[in-house]
Amino acid sequence: MRLFHGSNVAFKVPDLSVCRPNKDFGRGFYLSPDESAAQRMAVRTVRRFGGSPFVMVFEFDESRLDGIPVKRFSEPTIDWAMFVMANRRPDAPSGDHNRDNRYDLVVGPVANDNLALLFRQFALGLVSIEMLVREMQFKHLTRQYSFHTPAALAALRFVGISDVR
């Protein structure tokens, strides 16, 4: 399966040490099966940090995941929302998170900008978790694959780089 990563710099080898913490599924290397989503992320990253928009293309060999912990969310659920909140806010109480890389790979919906207001309202106690999940059912959410360890990254093979301009 082809996966795409949008960035403001071009590279061939992902470096987990430069990945930002407090992302949906924890600190990791995030890719999408949707090339246009990666292109949008590249443009957005350039607006925030400068550089030039690039999309890196990787081939993902799922057979190389045998024996490593993988967490999958097929759709937005209460468990998914609580997992995202626990990873985005390290002070949030939660039994399940990936701040410690307990999962080498996490796959699931992107809690994108369309959901930012809902997540803020939930964090402030203005909407319930049930309302948050119900409202997400009306949003078009793309999928993301987040690789958190060298063992997970070993399932990726660099294919090429596209200049988004």
Image (tube, rainbow, N blue to C red):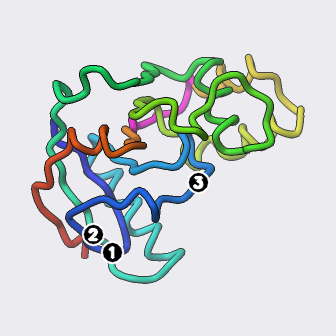
Q: CA distance from mark 1 to mark 2?
A: 6 Å
The numbered mark, 1 or 3, whose residue comes first in the sequence reads 1
Q: Helix, strand, or loop for circle 1?
A: loop
User: In front: mark 2 or mark 3?
Assistant: 3
Tell whether 131 sits left or right of 52. right
- Magenta span: 137-144
Tell whether 123 sits left or right of 63. right
Name the kind of residue labelled 1 in the image. Val
* Proximity of marks 1 and 2: CB atoms separated by less than 8 Å: yes
In the image, what residue occupies the spot 56% across and 41% down? 24
Give above or below for 33 relative to 66.
below
Give above or below for 63 relative to 9.
above
Residue 163 locus on image (x, y percent): 20, 72
User: In front: mark 1 or mark 3?
Assistant: 3
The numbered mark, 2 or 3, whose residue comes first in the sequence reads 3
The numbered mark, 1 or 2, whose residue comes first in the sequence reads 1
- Per the image, is 138 magenta? yes
Q: CA distance from mark 1 to mark 3?
A: 19 Å
Q: Quadrant of residue 16?
A: bottom left
Q: Which residue is mark 1?
A: 9
Which labelled disc corresponds to residue 54?
2
Estimate how packed mark 1 is, as few (under 14), some (14 to 19) or many (20 or more) residues with alpha carbons within 10 Å.
some
Tell whether 31 sits left or right of 87. left
Decide whether the magenta segment is chiefly helix, strand or loop.
loop
Q: Helix, strand, or loop for circle 2?
A: strand
Name the kind of residue labelled 2 in the image. Phe
Q: CA distance from mark 2 to mark 3?
A: 22 Å
Q: Residue furthest right?
A: 125
Q: Helix, strand, or loop for circle 3?
A: loop
